[in-house]
Image (spheres, rainbow, N blue to C red):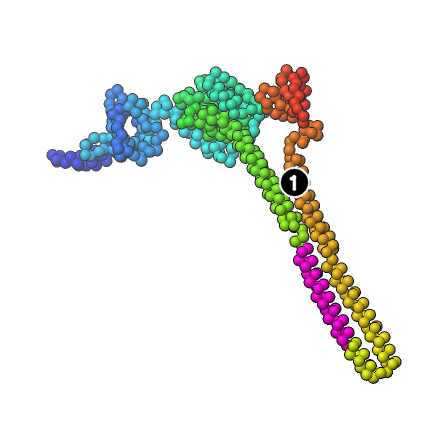
Amino acid sequence: MICKEKNKVYSVSEITWAIKSQLEGQFAGIYVQGEVSNFKQQSSGHIYFSLKDKDAQISCALFRNSAKRLTQLPKAGDQIVVFGEISVYPPRGNYQIIVRDIRLVGLGELLLKLHELKKELQNLGWFDPKVKKKLPPLPKRIAVVTSPTGAVIQDILNVLTRRFTNFQLLLNPVKVQGEGAAEEIAQAISDINKYDLADVIIVGRGGGSLEDLWPFNEKIVAQVIFESKIPIISAVGHETDYSICDFVADMRAPTPSAAAEIVIQEKDALLKHLSNASSQLIKAITHHLTVVKNTLLAVKKHPVFSFPYQLTAQKMQQIDDMKSKLEIAICHYVDMKKSHMFSLRKHIGSLNPSMQLVSAKEKLQRNTNRLILSWSSYYKTKREKMDKKSIQVRLYNFIKLLLETKTRAFKDLVSHIKSIDPKNLLKKGYSILFSEKDNSIILSCQQLEKKQKIYALVSDGKIKAITEEIEKS
């Protein structure tokens, strides 16, 4: 602060800096309410505007870093409350508010209340993904909490009836805006849980302003959604609208139609999976049959079956060769013995001993007999081992065993394919019940009504009938 001295002349900067130090020290961290005017946003991201009331106005500067933290920027004519500090801008010599935060009056108070409730519930762990319940894959009972006269229920019905069958839809009509709406919504969700009326709940309404959607931002609704034992899908407002209900629910849908699609997407995925599995199974069976058929054809075309003589031809030729060699060897051996015998005769004749000659003849005869018997036995053994008929029998037994093995494998495959054919079940006395209206399979008495046309598929045709009485277990 400058001490006043008599007759001293101050510079503009000295006075300006003195005022700046006084103001900024006295007016730090203040709230100021007024109407926005002269709103300008620079390319740098800084925002400048004036805050006025009926008697005065003050300049405001909202710098880029502070502006980024705001969820909604004000516009000319808005009533707002700013938080910041007073500052003096020396180059122009005027004072201004350096704005740190902005709160809209009216709508701004709702946003502040929404922000505070969101922070409170987040601290309680109500938004934690770990506490979210999984949606049932194939729900049969779907409850909708919404207005009975709005477009929400029609959108949901259109999607479900077009893409889903075998389900029950329960509409619990409630007010979706205005006084008492939050209490009705909470009570409807509580009742559905209390009496276990559904497998999944859709809570929703169409778009609207923050005030219109406010019942879905009430803590009473958030609490009953958090405590619900039944999975809940929130479909409140348009895709860009977010409510406390969206954060607490187990699943958030951008629109009511999208909520209906989320409910049935598991069934669509399952049907696609079954279709793909069926196609792959048919392809696998067809491929396997083709492979087996080709294998059987290859076996039938094998030279063993076309020209069985080829298996024995080589062995038979070897037998003939061995026989020829054996005959030659025997003849050679006999000739050699005859030559030896003639030599002995000559030798005996030269000695002329009668008794020795007779003895030698007898001995020679015995040796000759033994030799013939020995070679006959040897030739007979070899011939039996290489007998053509024996080889043909062994070959026949081998081919028969091979054909029996392949035939059994083929019959087992055919039997397996027949066992998985649903038509075989019908031949055993079973039947399949269909609704004549949409040709859908009837799995439960819950799907039937009196005087409903149905037909039963049996092994040799159809039996048409009309339900007279339904006994439910």
Instruction: Identify the residue shown where x is 67% and y is 45%.
Output: 406
Residue 194 visible in the shown view: no
Instruction: Identify the residue shown where x is 59% and y is 38%.
Output: 286
Q: Quadrant of residue 15?
A: top left
Q: Residue furthest right?
A: 355
Q: Residue furthest bottom?
A: 351
Q: Give how far across and how far down residue 312 sits, in percent.
A: 68, 55
Q: Magenta-highlighted stretch: main secondary structure? A: helix
Judged from the image, the secondary structure of the residue bearing numbered disc 1 is helix
Q: In the drawing, does residue 181 fall left or right of residue 447?
A: left
Q: Give how far across and how far down residue 329 sits, in percent.
A: 72, 69
Residue 330 forms part of the magenta stretch: yes
In the image, residue 190 sits, relative to residue 336, either above or below, namely above
Q: Nearer the viewer, residue 453 or 126?
A: 453
Residue 277 forms part of the magenta stretch: no
Q: In the drawing, does residue 208 fall left or right of residue 388?
A: left
Q: Quadrant of residue 5?
A: top left
Q: Nearer the viewer, residue 195 or 349?
A: 349
Instruction: Identify the residue shown where x is 25% and y is 31%.
Output: 42
Q: Nearer the viewer, residue 151 or 311?
A: 311
Q: In the drawing, does residue 124 fall left or right of residue 303?
A: left
- The segment highlighted magenta reads 312-340
Q: In the drawing, does residue 197 fall left or right of residue 234?
A: right
Instruction: Identify the residue shown where x is 47% and y is 29%.
Output: 252
Mark 1, residue position:
413
Q: Identity of the amino acid at label 1?
A: Leu
How many dots with numbers? 1
Where does the C terminus fall, quadrant-wise?
A: top right
